[in-house]
Image (tube, rainbow, N blue to C red):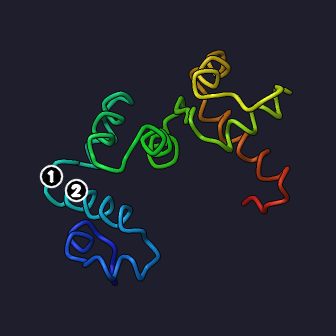
Amino acid sequence: MGRVAPDVLVRTDQATLEAAGLTRQKARYLRDLGSAVAGGALDVDALVDSDDALVRARLCAVPGIGPWTADVYLLMALRRPDAWPAADIALAAAVRQAKRLPERPDPVAMERIAEPWRPWRAVAARLLWHAYLVERGRPVD
């Protein structure tokens, strides 16, 4: 493919994307994202100055982008201090371990558990993910 950019994604054929390891559905979502950015329907630069709810709404309007992706984008790309991907399975597993819960909490329970950590839930998420990786013997940079 060469350089990965919105216009390149739009022009890349299905076979090339599948050869890169993408499923048919993921390839379609990737091209939809490229089209939204290239066509101006999604202005990623404007997301920087948008509040979290608006970022979620704009991202989730693109096919293939859901709440988890939007929350992770807020946390990792935009570095929002209160982003909390409540539906993240690894994060829920880490919360279960840290809180010594009998089972992994669902997203609703995750929101409730993290409420006292506002406005720094992103810090908690990073610490919990780190603990999750260390517990599994994975390298952490």
Q: Residue at x 82, y 31 (%)?
A: 98
Give coordinates of residue 136: x percent, y percent.
83, 54
- Residue 43 left/right relative to 81: left
Q: Nearer the viewer, residue 113 or 73?
A: 113
Point out residue 33 in the picture as x, y percentages from the top left corner. Answer: 28, 57
Mark 1 residue type: Gly
Residue topped by disc 2: 37
Element on which disc 1 rests: loop
Q: Residue at x 70, y 45 (%)?
A: 129
Residue 27, given in percent of the width and then of the height, sits at 34, 67
Q: Relative to residue 37, is residue 57 drawn left or right? A: right
- Tell whether 95 sits left or right of 34: right
Q: Nearer the viewer, residue 12 or 54?
A: 12
Left/right placement of residue 75 relative to residue 22 reads: right
Quarter of the image for residue 125 reads: top right
Quarter of the rendering containing residue 32: bottom left
Residue under label 1: 40
Q: CA distance from mark 2 to mark 1?
A: 5 Å
